[in-house]
Amino acid sequence: MKNDFGDTALTLAAATGLSAVIHLLVEKHEDLPDIMNGRRQLAVVVAALYGHEETVSYLYDVTLVESLLYVSKGDQNSKPVGDAAADYEGHYSEHNGFMLFKACITAEIYVQWGFVKKYRSDHGLAGKLLRRIIKELSRSNLYDINSILVNPTFTAVLQENVEFLKIVIEECPDVIWLEFKELPIFGHAISKGLEKIYTFVCKRTEISLLANMIPDRKGNTLLHQAAMLSPSPQLSQFLGPALQMQRELQRFKEVEKLTPMCRKLMNKRNQTPTDLFNDEHKDLKEEARVWLKEIAQSCSVVATLIVTIMFTAAFTVPGGENDDTGLPRKLGSKYFTIYIISDALSLLFSCTSAMIFLGIHTSLFREDDFRIKLPLALMFGLLTLFLSIATMMIAFGIALFIMLREHFMWISIPMLTLGSIPVSIYAILHVRIFIHVFRSTFRSYVK
């Protein structure tokens, strides 16, 4: 039985995700999952539209493949004709398999776990179904396959769903030329800084042909798109604007290698890609400059203090000096050797760190400096400061050990243990920045 909108009890239960009711209904009437409602949607499609993952997984298992691949002609009189027909098919295709994929991409169901639990690891069945859908649509004369694929492909690009795109491009290579809102689909990936999609596309040999595409209505080429500021990049959320600026530069330079003929082309605002990049990243550059200068100033103060302390410690040796010769009394001790080496290394590392951060503070902060020079300086500055703190604490612990080992040996061991706390705190606070700077500097934007 159906209501006035053509919904069965199973369709309504699927919309609310009532698992217990759904299982009872399917056990009682196993043909219910294959009955479409008034909007020509199967129950599994309804469940996907409402984002019920477990319900989609179960209903997909009990729905016939023939039902998913069935294409209803519908009421031909209600459909638009002429130029509007292709757009209608792209937005409102009544192919249940297509609607299911589109709904799952939007709800991130396919991205997170696939359609069937036993295929979680490789999404094998889901991939086979997608290939079957595309092949069936390609054989049919009722649909323009490109107009149907443009919207789900664009959604997959925004979701960075590489698996979906890989299958679509293999089965329908022309999708790489499709346009959405007057821009090639993968042009959106470049302009929005979607790294997974950008990396996947740039590995394909035919991507170099994209450079020959006609500019958009503003006269922007793909290189102009790469020059635009990416919206809310992930790095800026926890690593600061300097690292975001670096990634923006890397993205621009990589696209520039693929589209060398676009370097001098101007858009309708008489801007070359480089001019557009400088204009778009003007505020980000200023934020990155302030961020780096604040870090350099704070770290240089710490480094200077360590230089002062370790320089003084070099001439105030533990155990005192010989009154006759002026030499340290513990000069022949192996512990004193460790102390003096640690002191010298700490002084060397802290001086190096102070000079590096001074160089950052006095930098001209040109756009290209953010690509390699400034990130490398930040990384080595943090590394040398860490080493100076570590060797300083080693020197401190050894000095205590030399002075107290004869009478208060039990005190020196806890003090050596406590000396590792400042080093650990520094490492915990800065290791994420160091790792990401290292990765982003010593690898190409395209992996």
Image (cartoon, rainbow, N blue to C red):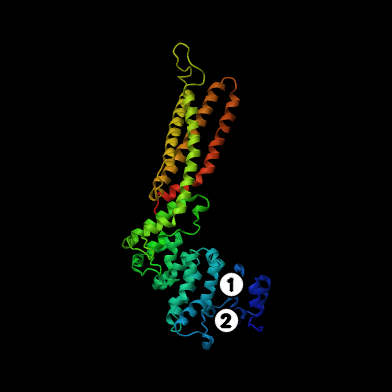
Residue 169: name its quadrant.
Answer: bottom left
Measuring 43% from the left and 81% from the top, which residue is drawn there? 139
Residue at mark 1: 49
Looking at the image, which is closer to me, 314 or 340?
314
Q: Name which residue type carries label 2.
A: Arg
Q: Which mark is residue 40?
A: 2
- The amino acid on which the numbered mark 1 sits, given as a three-letter code, is Leu
Q: Position of residue 99 (x, y in %)?
A: 53, 75
Q: Position of residue 441 (x, y in %)?
A: 41, 49
- Does the rendering let one see residue 202? no
Q: Residue at x 43, y 60 (%)?
A: 228
Residue 418 coordinates in the image, percent (x, y): 58, 33
- Residue 240 versus residue 257 in the image, above or below: above
Rounded to the nearest angstrom, the CA distance separating label 2 from label 1 is 13 Å
Name the residue rendered at 41%, 46% in the picture. 365
Q: Earlier in the sequence, mark 2 or mark 1?
A: 2
Q: Percent position (x, y) of residue 117?
A: 56, 66
Q: Are marks 2 and 1 in contact (CB under 8 Å)?
A: no
- Find numbered disc 2 in the image and state the secondary structure of the residue it sits on: loop
In this picture, is 263 found above or below 292? below
The numbered mark at residue 169 is none
**Mark 1 element type:** helix
Is 284 drawn above or below residue 206 in the view shown? above
Q: Quadrant of the N terminus?
A: bottom right
Q: Residues within 10 Å of mark 2 (few under 14, many from 20)?
A: some
* Extreme residue toward the top, this view: 324
